[in-house]
Amino acid sequence: MSIEISGAIREFKSLLGSSPIEPQKVADLLNGMGHEARIAATRSLGRAEQRRLYAGVDGFRPIRLVDIVPPSARDFRPVRHFGKNTLPAFTHFEKHFCRPKGVASDAPGKLYGYNFQPTSWLASITGPGYFIAHEDPGRTEVWVDYNQVPTEHPDEWPEIQSNEKGLGRFVYGFMIDTLRGVSEHVSIGSAARRGRDLGSWFVLCREP
């Protein structure tokens, strides 16, 4: 790991250790990092740090669907978000999003997506974890809704499967994640099943 990235991680963790967290300083730091440093910094966060970050940015930075898939991206062109969750194992993952065909690039209404696992055998057990993302009608947040799945997908994505069948139902079934904005490329999420908070968080870093 380079000195630059190591320094970025230390500074990021120092900001998250302050009380209270100052979200603007966090955002400025992340916005000033290169892509690889942002991924390393966000993937360095443990459970307590992700929990504090989720609470600390509540109401700070609105997040919209256009922050997840920028208007400059073509329809059906996948956009990668590099993630770190707070589960006991297999904590590194990615969420891939795309804008459906034929919708407004600056106001898409919904996005399609799935969870990419770096190990193919794990994906074969849990399934792809397809979802539809849409904006929270009451707050400036985004819901990642596993109760809904797309009707089509980019060619390179896996076959669409329901999240309510097989072993995948214990991972993705009946879940809705809530995303809050942290910086231009970074968001922080919390998972809930059937409306009940699970005490589980994840951080995402969008590719430039």
Image: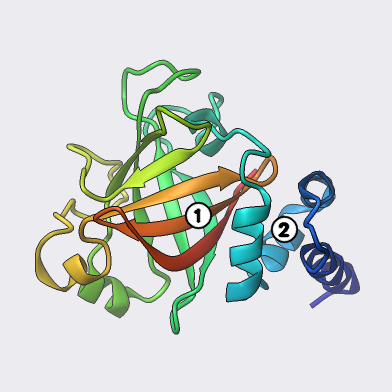
Going 83% across and 64% down the picture, which residue do you hit? 18
Distance from the alpha carbon under mark 2 to that under mark 1: 17 Å
Q: Is residue 201 above or below residue 167?
A: above
**Mark 1, other Cα within 10 Å: few <14 / some 14–19 / many ≥20:** many
What residue is rendered at 81% in x and 51% in y?
22
* Towards the viewer: 125 or 157: 125
Which three-letter amino acid code belongs to the residue tagged 1? Gly
Residue 148, above or below 90: above
Residue 5 placement (x, y as % from top left): 82, 68
Q: In this view, does 194 lie above or below 13?
A: above
Q: Nearer the viewer, mark 2 or mark 1?
A: 1
Left or right side of 99 for 60: right
165 left or right of 81 in image = left
Instruction: Residue under label 1, please give it.
Output: 189
Considering the image in quadrants, where does the N terminus appear? bottom right
Residue type at mark 2: give it.
Arg
Report which quarter residue 103 is drawn in. Answer: top left
* Residue 177 located left or right of residue 158: right
Residue 57 located left or right of residue 147 = right
Q: Do the residues labelled 2 and 1 touch (CB within 8 Å)?
A: no
Q: Which residue is drawn at 78% across and 56% down?
A: 21
Quadrant in which the C terminus is drawn: top right
Question: Residue 97: percent from the left, percent from the top?
Answer: 41, 43
Q: Which residue lies furthest to the bottom in this view?
A: 88
Q: Of the two numbered discs 2 and 1 on the same chain, state the one appearing first in sequence.
A: 2
- Residue identified by numbered label 2: 38
